[in-house]
Amino acid sequence: MNDKITELLETILKAIVSKPEEVKVTRTTDEMGVLLSVKLGDGDAGMVIGRQGKTIQAIRIMMAAVGMKNRAKLNIKLDVPDRAEMPGRNQNPDGTPKDRTRLEDIGL
């Protein structure tokens, strides 16, 4: 049962993302229920989350229904890199750091 739940989630996610080979789902169990932690490739989190969170909400609802059938509370956690730490986020196209002017620096 447990492997089928993680396989189901992996199959759904791999059908959505652009880098299916980088989708990893790990399962942990505690007193709160079953936690499915999802690791995605760079840039795939937006596709999984969807507009206004509709896609991940639908996935969570569907997985909750599967959990109810198996008498388990399922929670899904997306391990998404912080946007500030993403490659290229704070760099110019030539790789040099972007010049960020802070309000304190200009007296505001």
Image (tube, rainbow, N blue to C red):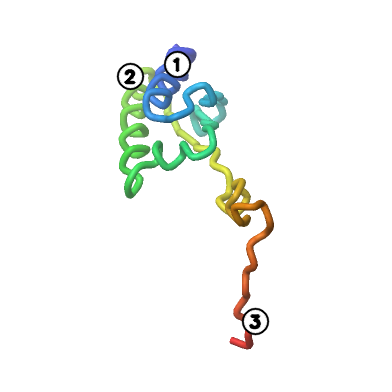
Residue 5, picture quadrant: top left
Disc nearest the viewer among 2 and 3: 3
Residues under labels 1 and 2: Cα distance?
Answer: 16 Å
- Tag 1, which secondary structure? helix
Please tell me which residue is depicted at 55% across the width and 38% down the height of the picture.
79
- Mark nearer the N terminus (1 vs 2): 1
**Residue 13 as seen in the image, left or right of residue 105:** left
**Height in image: 98 above or below 55?**
below
Measuring from the top left, give residue 96's x and y in whole percent.
68, 56
Q: Label 3 is placed on what type of residue?
A: Glu
Residue 7's disc number: 1
Q: Label 2 is placed on what type of residue?
A: Lys
**Residue 9 as seen in the image, left or right of residue 39:** left
- Tag 3, which secondary structure? helix
Please tell me which residue is depicted at 62% across the width and 74% down the height of the picture.
101
Q: Quadrant of the C terminus?
A: bottom right
Label 3 crowd (10 A; few <14 / some 14-19 / many >=20)? few
- Mark nearer the N terminus (2 vs 3): 2
Measuring from the top left, give residue 46's x and y in whole percent.
42, 42
Disc nearest the viewer among 1 and 2: 1
Residues under labels 3 and 1: Cα distance?
Answer: 50 Å
Please tell me which residue is depicted at 45% across the width and 21% down the height of the picture.
10
Q: Can you identify the residue that label 3 sits on?
A: 104
Please tell me which residue is depicted at 53% across the width and 33% down the height of the picture.
41
Measuring from the top left, give residue 95's x and y in whole percent.
66, 52
Query: Is the Cβ of the residue at disc 1 closer than 8 Å to that at disc 2?
Result: no
**Height in image: 98 above or below 81?**
below
Q: Quadrant of the N terminus?
A: top left
Q: Can you identify the residue that label 2 sits on?
A: 69
Q: Label 1 is placed on what type of residue?
A: Glu
Measuring from the top left, give residue 84's x and y in whole percent.
59, 54
**Residue 61 as seen in the image, left or right of residue 76:** left
